[in-house]
Amino acid sequence: MLSWKKDWKAPSSQAARHLHLSTSAISRRIDSLEQRLDVRLLHRSTRLVALTAEGSQYLSEILPALDSLAMAGDRLVEGRQLIRGDIRAVFPVNYGRLYIAPHLAEFLRRHPHVRLEAIFDDSFNDISGESLDLAIRIGQLEDSRLVARRIATDSRVLVASTGYLDRYGLPAHPTDLLHHNCLHYTRFRSPQRWRFQRGEENLSIAVDGNLRADYGLALTNGRLCEVLNEWSLPEIGVYAVTPSREVPARVKALVDFLAESLPDA
């Protein structure tokens, strides 16, 4: 905040330094104001700049407005420091239920002035069009207009139901999957190719099957067991996606909290 009375009585060079302007710029602005008001506001000499009687009257009348402007700026700064306001965030259904939802109460405990609307949806929502502040997405990101921050890693394993393995046998090698009924989660937009790695060996298998679903739990029936466990599947990223880099402090606080809380395994 400026000390207005001292600024107006200070030499123009001192005022210029305080306001980060040149002395000539200060003089031009004062001249323009005096011309507009048709009154002399300052007595000028080579050593001092002082208010005239009209200048003192003008300053006393505008000080309340100047103070109000300064206080409004201070309140904005305080508002950025105090985490408050509404957040609309969308989370993947299963991942959100298992790993995000259990932590939301703690986030709101830390930030009691935040109101969070948590939407659990596996669709790739139009963040800007649906007025969303944040989306948590897993896997490949396609919309380059959005800003993404990787906040966790999700490991994957290959599983099959024990009933299926009893009927069709256990695959011994990834290429055996070409002859198996492989399920497809349609929210992953990439082609249905499963990638495997073992040491220096890398394989990409174009699998197929007779059930496709956009809901993960619909693809996991019965008791499951891991298969081909000597092969690893690529890890996939968990991303916090926002409409732009300039996000409110409350949204940044939620992203930081999730990056701290989510498992990275």
Image: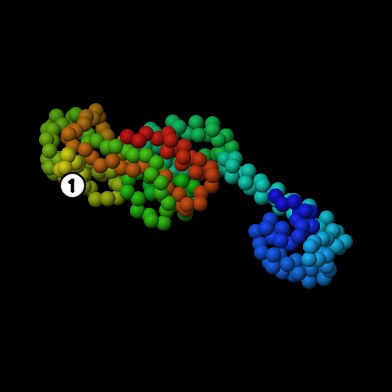
The picture places residue 73, in percent across and down from the top left corner, at 66, 50
The image shows a total of numbered marks equal to 1
Percent coordinates x, y for residue 147 in the rendering? 42, 51
What x and y, as percent, mark residue 106? 50, 31
Q: Is residue 29 above or below residue 160?
A: below
Residue 162, visible in the rendered structure: yes
User: For mark 1, what is the residue?
Assistant: 204
Residue pictured at 34% horizontal, 43% vertical:
237
Amino acid of disc 1 = Ser
**Toward the viewer: 22 or 265?**
22
Q: Can see residue 161?
A: no
Report the front residue among 5 and 219: 5
Q: Quadrant of residue 170?
A: top left
> In which quadrant will I find the C terminus?
top left
Residue at the front extreme, as displayed? 47
Tell me if residue 55 comes above or below residue 202 in the rendering.
below
Image coords of residue 199 (percent x, y): 17, 39
| Residue at horizontal 28 percent and vertical 43 percent from the top | 185
Q: Residues within 10 Å of mark 1 (few under 14, many from 20)?
A: few
In-image side of 153 versus 51 (left or right): left
Q: Is residue 89 left or right of residue 19?
A: left
Quarter-of-image position of residue 172: top left
In this picture, residue 179 sits left or right of residue 236: left
Q: Is residue 6 above or below residue 23?
A: above
Please name the residue shown 62% across and 46% down the image: 77
Identity of the residue drawn at 21% across and 38% down: 232
Q: Nearer the viewer, residue 47 or 167?
A: 47
* Residue 17 horizontal side relative to residue 52, left or right: left
Q: Which element is circle 1 on?
A: strand
